Image (tube, helix red, strand yellow):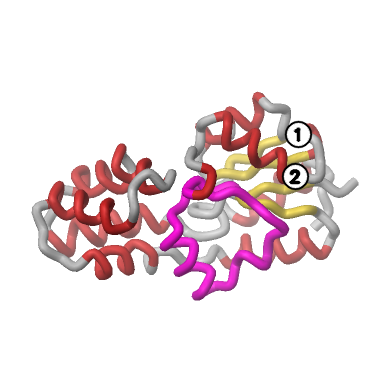
Amino acid sequence: MNKTIIFDLGGVYFTDGTRVAIDAIAAGYNIAREAVADVLNGHLGKQYRIGALSAEQFWRRAKTHWDIKEAAETLSLLWCSSYRTNDGTVGLVKRLRNAGHELLYLSDNTAERVAYLDQKYNFLPKFDDGIFSHVVKCKKPDPAIYQLLLEKASQPAGACVYIDDKPRYLVPAKKLGMEVIAFKNAGQLETGLKELALPA
C-alpha cells in the first residue's frame, strides 16, 4: 500500500545548516555561540521563520543584537550556504517516489533560504507538495501546521509517515495518528521505512 511520506528538510533532506551557520558566525565575528544561537533559533528566528519579520528586519535586529556592522546579504548567504543535501536521503526520496508514494515536506523555513536552496539544488520538484512555516505563519511544534499539512495529503493521518531529526517535532504528528521516524541518517531511515513495510 502506498503512503504519504512527509520529510522535514533541514537535518533530514539537507544537513543541519543552522548549526553550521551558528558556528561560522560565532567564529567569524567573535561572538559567543550562545548569542548567535539565541538569534537564529530563538524568538527573532521564530518570527523570521513564520514571516512576521522580513529578511531586512530580521538581519537589522540580529546585527544590533550581535553589535556587528556586516552586510545583511553576507550574513544571509552564510546561513543559506551552510546547507548541503544529504545524498543518502536524496537517493531514498527518488526511490520512494518511483515506488509510487506521495512525498511532502514540512519545514520551518524562510522565503530567502527556500529560494536559495531550490536554485542551487532544485529540490522542490522532488516533492509533490508541502508546507513552509513562512507561508502559513506558524511553525513546528504548533499542532496547526500539522493539520494544514494533512489537508494537503492525499492519505488520512493513519497512512502518513512523518520524518524529523528533532524528536519533539514528532510528538504532534504522532498525536494526530501519523507514523513517525526520528531521523539519524539515511540508512537508519530506510530501515525504519522497511519496518513499516514501505517499499523503496
Compared across the picture, whether 194 is left or right of 65 comes to right
Q: Amino acid at mark 1?
A: Ala
Give the farthest residue toward the right.
1
Q: Quick check: 97 above or below 139?
A: below
The single residue placed furthest to the top in the displayed view is 175
Q: Nearer the viewer, residue 59 or 29?
A: 59
User: Disc 2 and disc 1: Cα gap in Å?
Assistant: 8 Å
- Name the quadrant containing residue 35: top left
Q: Quadrant of residue 159?
A: top right
In x, y percent, where is residue 24? 25, 61
Q: Do tag 2 and tag 1 residues touch (Cβ < 8 Å)?
A: yes
- Residue at 72% x, 40% y is 151
- Quarter of the image with the C terminus is bottom right
Q: Position of residue 183 (x, y in %)?
A: 58, 46
Q: Which residues are magenta?
A: 106-134
Q: Nearer the viewer, mark 2 or mark 1?
A: 2
Q: Within the magenta stretch, is there residue 33? A: no
Assign a secondary structure to mark 2: loop
On the picture, is 81 further left or further right than 36?
A: right
- What's the amino acid at mark 2? Ala
Disc ID at residue 153: 2
**Percent from the top left, x then y, of residue 186?**
62, 56
Q: Which mark is residue 157?
A: 1
Q: Residue at 76%, 34% (x, y): give it.
A: 157
Could you say where residue 92 lies in the image, as x and y percent from the top left? Answer: 70, 61
Residue 113 painted magenta: yes
Of 147 and 97, which appears nearest the observer? 147
